[in-house]
Amino acid sequence: MKLMIYAEHRDGQIRKVTFENISLAKQLGLPFEVVLIGNTSEDAVESLGKYGAEKVIKVSTPGLDTYSPDGYAKALAEIVKKQGADILMLGATATGKDLAPRVSALLNAPAATDCIQVELDGDQLKLIRPMYAGKVRANIRLNGDVQILTVRPNVYSAVESPVQASVQEESVAVSDVKTILKEIVSGAKGKLDVTEADIIVSGGRGMKGPENWHLIEELADLLGAATGASRAAVDAGWRPHDEQVGQTGKTVSPSLYIAIGISGAIQHLAGMSSSKYIVAINKDPEAPIFKVADYGIVADLFDVVPRMIEELKKMKN
Ligand SMILES: Cc1cc2nc3c(=O)[nH]c(=O)nc-3n(C[C@H](O)[C@H](O)[C@H](O)COP(=O)(O)OP(=O)(O)OC[C@H]3O[C@@H](n4cnc5c(N)ncnc54)[C@H](O)[C@@H]3O)c2cc1C
């Protein structure tokens, strides 16, 4: 069985989930190739080699230097066919969610998205993915000549295993491309994305208003964390949508998730319950967030969070 890993990149840099998928492929013991489409920085191939990618297929698509949903899907489907890959693996990121179903349709191949466990049973993939907002976990086996899966970021670790990556240059002409990227309007530059962060400090309606968010930001800064929010905070216009964690926001799996003034509605839990450690700060001891929390602090957040900030500042000095 031959595995192909789609190398996701942003601003020319390979995204962490790709390194995680390479480490997963090595763990599975399957031969694999990494496919890189579009313009990247000079050291992109080198960074793939650092995590153990021995072979990188560098695909140029004339007229498509930047991401195009249907254009990249067509190019990726072509490369999968050309290289004779049996499995295509992507990250369960916004890009992976966009590309996987398109490639699946083009190749008439089954796809399992947002997998949180990937194993091999003989030559069959044995996958686990959450369903119904995380209420159940489904065991999945795919049946098809080509099988597609996306893997949730941060579930598998990226482990360095340096090799010299060899590069195979390929050019794929895609026609009838309907979407061309003209401009990217990005949010705050340099802001850590919740899906890639190892620590997340999230706030909810209990924060009372945007004027109190400096507490979340200060705590996050001290911990080197990204800031997240519940939908209530986003809907109220206190926080941007790209910080929303949950069923209709982002799915995260950090090592540490600190939920502050968040009740723990099922739709919020759907996005963060696979975090390795969950700390909840809530004044209501009955709040459902405590059911998933590893550590709970039943207290007024306006009392506890400033104290945490003070203690962390002391530790840093
Ligand atoms: C289809 C659908 C999709 C949804 N998708 C999402 C999603 O993606 N993400 C998401 O988050 N929600 C989502 N929701 C909304 C979800 O159901 C909840 O309404 C929302 O998560 C509640 O946000 P919250 O916990 O911040 O607010 P609340 O439920 O109001 O909780 C606030 C918490 O703060 C605590 N608190 C208040 N003051 C203090 C204080 N001073 N100190 C300590 N604690 C305090 C309270 O005890 C309470 O537990 C979705 C809902 C639907 C129907």
Image (cartoon, rainbow, N blue to C red):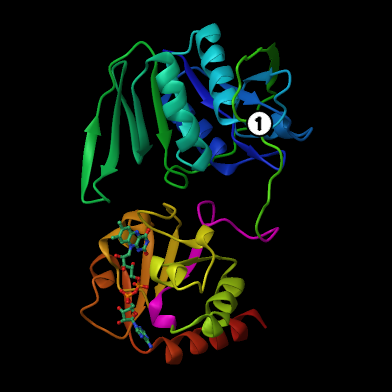
Left or right? Give the position of 33 relative to 233.
right
SS for tag 1?
A: loop
Classify 100 as above or below 297.
above
Specify whether residue 193 is painted magenta. yes
How far across and how far down the image is residue 235, in percent?
A: 43, 68
Left/right of residue 62 with respect to residue 128 in the rendered view: right
Whether residue 205 appears in magenta in the rendering, the answer is yes
Q: Quadrant of the C terminus?
A: bottom right
Q: Mainly helix, strand or loop, the magenta region?
A: loop
Farthest residue to the right: give it. 42
Location of residue 265 in the rendering, given as x and y in whole percent from the top left corner: 27, 66
Apparent side of residue 117 relative to residue 4 in the rendered image (left or right): left
* Figure quadrant of residue 197: bottom right
User: Above or below — where is 14 with respect to 303?
Assistant: above
Which corner quadrant of the figure contains ligand 1? bottom left
Nearer to us in this view, 55 or 264: 264
Q: Picture quarter containing residue 174? A: top right
Q: Identify the residue under disc 1.
A: 180
Q: Amino acid at mark 1?
A: Ile
Residue at image location 37% in from the left, 15% down from the top: 108
Boundaries of the magenta span? 188-207
Local packing at callout 1 (Cα closer than 10 Å; few below 14, some 14-19, many 20+) is some
- Residue 139, compared with residue 148, is above or below; it is below
Residue shown at the point (46%, 33%) measured from the top left: 24
Question: Residue 300 location in percent, x, y?
Answer: 37, 89
